[in-house]
Image (cartoon, rainbow, N blue to C red):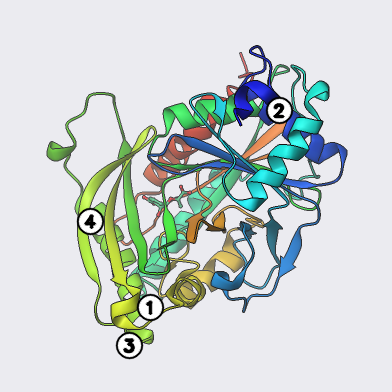
Amino acid sequence: MDTTTSVSSPTITEIDLLSYLIQHAVDNQFSVAVWRLPNNNTRHIILSRQHEKLKTDITLEELPTGFIFAPFDTASERIYLKADFSFSFTDDGLNEPVTPLEITSSAWLQAKRDEIKKRKAGYYHIQRTSGDTQKDAYLNVVALGIAETEKETFQKVVPSRSKAVTLPPDFDIVNAFMKLCAGNPNALISFVSTPETGSWLGATPEMLVNVEGHTIFKTVALAGTQPYREGMNLKSVAWTQKDIEEQALVERYIISCFKRIRLREYDEHGPKTVVAGNLLHLKSEFTVDMQATDFLQLGTTMLQLLHPTSAVCGMPLNAALDFLRKHEGYDRQFYAGFLGPVNFKNNIHIFVNLRCAQLLESQAVLYAGAGVTIDSVPEQEWEETEIKMNTLLNVISPVRPA
Ligand SMILES: C=C(O[C@H]1C=CC=C(C(=O)O)[C@@H]1O)C(=O)O
């Protein structure tokens, strides 16, 4: 069955279908997740009639096909969007349904075809609970963080901040999603909208847990930041001692998690310089053969151990977390939490929710943090959070003050 032509007349595009599906979710109090994996040309959308709250001790591998959405705070509830409808698009066309879920979804969409017309999709939005982090306050937290590294309370902490910008009147969520896909080929692009969490849009470069076909586990250590300019030769990019040390701490954190479960056989590659939209980072990749090591639920185990990594919290974890709770001054909500598709074709792709924005009725709240070590300079960390926020700002293109 050629679903591209049967569901949609030649003038109905992928954008029209995505807009229709998102609007349908909002009209019916369903939850919705849209995503595109890194270095992949397929966009996915699922609708969930009733999202669930997950216990922290769930086994990922046993969940039905769906999308996980977890806040930074490990004590807060994690949301699971079980896929009740599932569609994917490649090259502007709806893909041929293959799985039973896709086949029933496709039949459902066929029945709705007369309703599909060009329109902008709405999304859920909730009230913001805190204001912007003022620059002085952020510089102060960074200076306090540096002072604590000097006292050896911790070696690294990652203070973050939030900033609201006004959305342009013609803001269109599906257009913004597509622009993020085009500008960030190496990122997980995501849009999640539920009545409870409101709407979150992101382009994250940081993979947290990837399990391929119950056999291969992967995670990454990502840190160190500098601006990327088109045409730069990645092989000749130089990194400061501070960036190298900052990324090495994330590596050590991951290795310490492996040690806690006595997993000794893993491959480590890197660090190497990678592009993440408008930025460069240092990245090492860790791979484990789950069958050879007999860790068949390594995805679940490592998710419990890794989150929050030293890329978003600090090292050692508890000292850094205590510091952030005391000084950061706002609730991160889903920023620096984790998200991603679970058990689509036996694969799990969970990422840290970075470079993201929470969409309010007429504003977007941007979030970013920066790794602070003994060599940090507060003003430079502020600048780093500004350029990290640009990943989303460039796409949202808000009305900037004159
Ligand atoms: C905490 C963020 O980025 C992390 C990931 C890569 C590089 C980072 C850094 O250089 O500080 C951060 O650890 C963020 O984007 O908000």
First along the sequence among labels 3 and 2: 2
Q: For mark 4, give the secondary structure.
A: helix
Q: Quadrant of residue 222?
A: bottom left
Q: Quadrant of the N terminus?
A: top right
Where the C terminus falls, by quadrant?
top right
Label 2 environment density (alpha carbons within 10 Å; few <14, some 14–19, many ≥20): many
Taking depth in this image into account, of 277 and 292 the one nearest to the observer is: 292
Task: State the mark number for residue 262.
Answer: 3
Report the mark closest to the observer, 3 or 2. Answer: 2
Residue 116 point in image, percent of width and height = 77, 23
Q: What amino acid type should be assigned to the residue bearing mark 4?
A: Ile
Residue bearing the label numbered 2:
19
In the rendered image, residue 93, in percent from the top left (x then y), is placed at 55, 26
For the view shown, which residue lies furthest in the front direction?
Answer: 1
Viewed as shown, does residue 395 lie left or right of 197?
A: left
Instruction: Pick whichever of labels 2 and 1 is earlier in the sequence.
Output: 2
| Residue situated furthest left in the rendering | 236
Are there few (<14), some (14-19), or many (20+) residues within 10 Å of tag 4? some
Of circles 2 and 4, the one toward us is 2
Q: Dot 1 corresponds to which residue?
A: 257
Residue at numbered disc 4: 244
* Label 3 Cα neighbours within 10 Å, binned few <14 / some 14-19 / many ≥20: few
From mark 2 to mark 1, how far is it between C-alphas?
Answer: 41 Å
Q: Do the residues bearing badges 1 and 3 touch, measured as CB atoms within 8 Å? A: no
Q: Please, what secondary structure does the residue beneath circle 3 have?
A: loop
Indicate left or right for 220 with 165 as reference: left
Q: Residue 293's x, y, as percent? A: 30, 81
Q: Amino acid at mark 1?
A: Cys
Give the crowd class for mark 1: few <14, some 14-19, many >=20 residues within 10 Å: some
Asked whether disc 3 touches disc 4, contact meaning CB atoms under 8 Å apart, the reply is no
Q: Secondary structure at mark 2?
A: helix
